[in-house]
Amino acid sequence: MKQMRALLLVLVFFFPAACHGWGVDGHYIVCQIAQEKLSETTAVAVNDLLPDYAKNNLSSLCSWADHVKFIFPWSSELHYVNVPDDSCTYNYSRDCKDESGVQGRCVSGAIFNYTSQLLTYRNSSFDIKYNLTQALLFLSHFVGDVHQPLHVGHTTDKGGNTIDVHWYTKKTVLHHVWDGGIIETVEEDFYDSNVDDYTDALNKNITGEWSDQISKWQSCSGNQITCPDIYASESISAACDWAYKNVTEGSVLEDEYFYSRLPIVDLRLAQAGVRLAATLNRIFS
Ligand SMILES: *[C@@H]1O[C@H](CO)[C@@H](O)[C@H](O)[C@H]1NC(C)=O
Ligand SMILES: *[C@@H]1O[C@H](CO)[C@@H](O)[C@H](O)[C@H]1NC(C)=O
Ligand SMILES: *[C@@H]1O[C@H](CO)[C@@H](O)[C@H](O)[C@H]1NC(C)=O
Ligand SMILES: *[C@@H]1O[C@H](CO)[C@@H](O)[C@H](O)[C@H]1NC(C)=O
Ligand SMILES: *[C@@H]1O[C@H](CO)[C@@H](O)[C@H](O)[C@H]1NC(C)=O
Ligand SMILES: *[C@@H]1O[C@H](CO)[C@@H](O)[C@H](O)[C@H]1NC(C)=O
Ligand SMILES: *[C@@H]1O[C@H](CO)[C@@H](O)[C@H](O)[C@H]1NC(C)=O
Ligand SMILES: [Zn+2]
């Protein structure tokens, strides 16, 4: 156990720029926004599940799921979902499966999975089937991923992973522009490369600009605890309207793309944080 934990720590600290999902900063921002919105009961439960070295600090482990892809290879397909190339909508029964066709193995299926595992927390003395620390870290990460528009992208280009572009002068792929490029550029240009200042600016809009939308972001129809299919539908819609739009192989993306797409990135990070908190509050309260 000790060795495993040491290995995990090493993985977390020495592979900081893994390439799937929002980058490290994106996930950190999502969890940082969520953390401040946890109810008292939820914060206690979350803290109980966090390992000793991360008490009161969910955001420090929000990229954990990216770093365990090596030791849990089965988890790598849970970070995203692909939809048919000619579609801009998401359909769980059509789309949520892995490459061999196993139903439910995709990012929204994983969110349902880890939500229902965490619901056993209240009853944990009856049910020790799951490692709820891992369930918490997977859930917190995947709620972030499902909000990254290109994590619900098209099949053939693997969510923009096969589309070569330049981000300003840097050679990359479209997927990475959305994982990290736009976030890094906004931090450098406007926040002195300080991720906490960017997070503060998002929080300001959550209590200002967007305040009248928050309850809509939080709510799921019926008595659902979480509604990842809605989050995924919004993502593919934003992917078609913004991420893929006007981009072809070899495109040079710079200011025009950056300034027009930044509001989408701002919005998706904020929504992910608000919804992660709402989901955790419904699970634990
Ligand atoms: C949370 O963890 C990060 C990285 O591990 C660390 O830099 C930060 O100081 C911690 N914050 C708190 C409040 O403990
Ligand atoms: C979703 O996909 C399933 C299976 O392909 C299909 O039967 C169903 O009609 C689709 N639902 C919608 C709303 O398109
Ligand atoms: C559900 O969680 C278990 C435990 O981590 C994992 O083995 C399984 O692959 C997960 N399935 C999905 C669809 O997330
Ligand atoms: C907790 O577990 C007991 C025994 O398995 C079960 O009867 C009860 O309904 C469970 N409570 C909740 C809240 O799941
Ligand atoms: C649960 O998972 C965490 C993170 O991988 C690990 O550190 C911990 O030892 C595991 N707990 C148990 C009881 O296996
Ligand atoms: C906050 O909202 C203002 C006004 O719409 C906008 O100009 C600014 O870019 C937003 N900032 C963030 C970080 O969302
Ligand atoms: C795509 O390009 C057209 C033509 O230059 C332009 O009018 C339109 O605003 C662009 N759309 C987006 C979302 O960038
Ligand atoms: Zn991911």
Image (cartoon, rainbow, N blue to C red):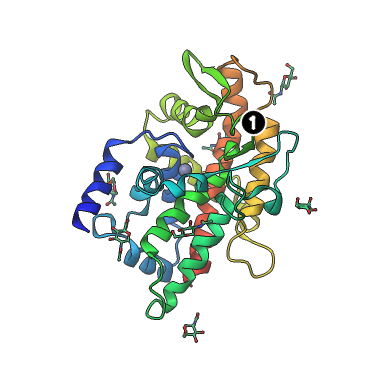
Q: Residue at x 58, y 55 (%)?
A: 109
Q: Is residue 154 left or right of residue 20?
A: right
Q: Is residue 82 visible?
A: yes
Q: Is residue 205 visible?
A: no
| Residue reaching furthest to the front | 100
Instruction: State the image coordinates of residue 11 (x, y, percent, origin top left).
Output: 29, 42
Residue in the foreground of this view, choosing between 43 and 156 = 156
Give the vertical position of 94 relative to 258 (above or below). Answer: below
Instruction: Give residue 29's quadrant in the image.
Output: top left
Instruction: State the image coordinates of residue 206 (x, y, percent, origin top left).
Output: 54, 48
Q: Is mark 1 within 8 Å of ligand 2?
A: no
Label 1: element kind: loop
Q: Residue at x 20, y 52 (%)?
A: 3
Give the vertical position of 193 relative to 269 (above or below). Answer: above
Q: Residue at x 40, y 67 (%)?
A: 130
Ligand 5 lies in quarter:
bottom left
| Residue reaching furthest to the left | 2
Number of numbered tags placed on the structure image: 1
Circle 1 sits on which residue?
Answer: 156
Pick the quarter of the image with the N terminus: bottom left
Residue neighbourhood size for the residue with mark 1, other residues' Cα within 10 Å, grouped as few (<14), some (14–19), many (≥20): few
Q: Residue at x 37, y 28 (%)?
A: 192
- Which three-letter amino acid code belongs to the residue tagged 1? Thr
Instruction: Give residue 156's quadrant in the image.
Output: top right
Q: Is residue 153 left or right of residue 4?
A: right
Instruction: State the image coordinates of residue 103 (x, y, percent, origin top left).
Output: 62, 55
Q: Is residue 182 left or right of residue 82?
A: left
